[in-house]
Image (cartoon, helix red, strand yellow):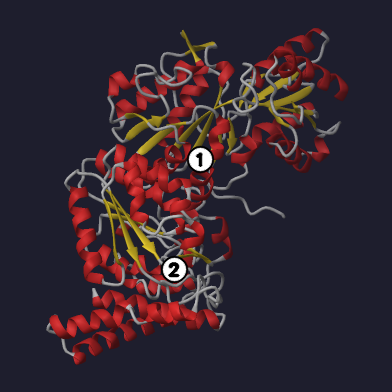
Amino acid sequence: MYRKMQSIRKFEKTASVFFAEGKIPGFVHLYIGEEAIAVGACANLRDDDYITSTHRGHGHIVAKGGNLKYMMAELFGKETGYCKGKGGSMHIADAELGILGANGIVGAGHLIATGAAWSAKYRGTDQVSVCFFGDASTNQSTFHEAMNLASLWKLPVIFVCENNLYGISVSQARHQNIQDISERASGYGMPSLSADGNDVLTVYEKVGEAVSRARAGEGPTLLEFKTYRHHGHFEGDAGAYRPKEEVEAWLQKDPLPRFESYLLDNGGLTEEELEAIRQEIDQEIREALEFADASPYPAPESSVRDIYSDLIEEARIR
Amino acid sequence: MRKITYGEGIREALREKMLENKNVVLLGEDVGPYGGTFGVTKGLWEQFGEERVRDTPISEGVIVGASVGAAATGLRPVAELMFIDFLTFGMDGLVNQAAKMRYMFGGKISVPLVLRLPAGGGISAGAQHSGSLEAWVTHVPGLKVVYPSNAQDAWGLMLTAIDDDNPVVYIESKVLYSQKSELPDKVEPIPFGSARIAREGSDVSIITYGKQVHDALKAAAALAKDGIEAEVIDLRSLYPLDKETIFGSVGKTHRALVVTEEVKRGGYGGELSALISEQCFDELDAPVVRIGALDAPVPYSQVLESLVLPSAEDIIKGVKEML
């Protein structure tokens, strides 16, 4: 879990630098500060379990086992990227790892994860589906529609709310009249809880319980984890809407040093061993960067490929 | 030969595919014991059971969105919305998710979903239950769109739709559900992008689909009495589009009349018209003419509704003005 958390942190720190340098185009929404949730949750999952992600998706992809090289190449818009350069940061998917996509539409994943859970149940597997989403997406109709169907049909889906207290620039107090999103489950007859999202062990344990319930056919759970993003909503957003004291207080609760202290005190690991892991990851990131840098951009004809499984759009005169 | 209705044609295709492939599942509002708002799924719940023919809450978002998730993970859902107008609630699932997933994910995820959408006016159902919104869906890369006009095509197109690995929007004409037509003993799948020449003619090409095929045939019969031979093309599939048949016909008749039930403004008829004008300019002896509904929501009163929607008389008038 520590390795995964560090991979996310270092991958994103690198992405942040290359975005600032103009090597990564478009929008980049970083997950830094929230690593404990993706990692704690996905540590309970098998490769054939499903996840749906948000536009802040890098963490979920890495936590589910995503390949750093293909991720970096995708951010660079290269042919060798996860989506052949057609998805970018907000749309990374990996069918083989059950990653049904990061999503640029707030709230879309709720329904997709619910549909995937229905499919798993119908096919008689014990696969589960984990839906990651933010606090603000619970104001979308999709959240309520999905919660209703999942509880009605007892689907093996775990709704994991990453409550980072802001919907872009709007604080939770200004976008909903409740503090604990877990309250919303009561309207759907669904078990739920709120917990510390910066403690990877808590996340691991709570999601583990929900996954066991889901695999046993006992239906969905809503889990809310409180957390905080260290960067702005997207790279380039200075986050001026957040009080300095609040940011400072949350930086003190950074999930990574917290888990490091735990591992040193109770996990039988030494600082040297942690440093060795960090260096291995640095090496992986360097390789991912070299791979991305050396990879070609997509060929022009690729722009009209992969729209359909069988048709190719004509390149027309514009 | 036997006669069945358009609605039965859809149902028999569903039954055939459900017997063949366990991963074909139906879902929607009232599709279970009730048999569907227009009776299309009658008897399928009894035959295939609750797990395969699922009544959903009244929630078009969930019908489309959950179908996308299910389709991306191994099922072949056939989802029904009661009226095409309710697509407004399911639009994100269809347009931003189903249609774009394959492309955004580099071709690695398929969404073999069929979305059934009863469309069109003519039953005094008012503006929120009478829409013709094919332009919305044909505008979106990643979707295939079909619109049958008779029982055999309804059956054959549905067989193809369910086997297709892409999201298919299957638009049904409400006023045709009870209309019977003759069928061969074995209905074959109809490949998408293959139009049908419903009537051969040499003086003008009437290009249309769905309910308007019947109006066009009626108009053609009346025009024949005046010595005008109209060719009627039933597109069957709006995307992919059988351009060859359209262009071939226009090359023969040198006149094209596009007939759709939708509001003309910004419509799919405009796309057809522009395509013919661009590609067949040298063949045309007259500008392409569009016949469609007036630019109004569909009104309730029968008097107004028949005024707003296009009719066989409008087609006759349109043809005569071109000649």
State which quadrant residue A303 falls in.
bottom right
For the residues beneath circles 1 and 2, the answer to whether they share a chain is: no
Q: Is residue B323 visible?
A: no
Name the residue at 31% across, 36% down: B23
The residue indicated by pointer 2 is: A81
SS of the residue under disc 2: loop
The residue indicated by pointer 1 is: B90
**Viewer-side residue, B60 vs B51:** B60
Residue B242 position, x and y percent, is 62, 35
SS of the residue under disc 1: helix
Q: Amino acid at mark 2?
A: Gly
Name the residue at 53% across, 16% down: B177
Residues marked 1 and 2 touching at CB (< 8 Å): no
Residue A100 position, x and y percent, is 38, 55
Q: Amino acid at mark 1?
A: Gly
**Viewer-side residue, A256 vs B13:** A256
State which quadrant residue A274 falls in.
bottom left
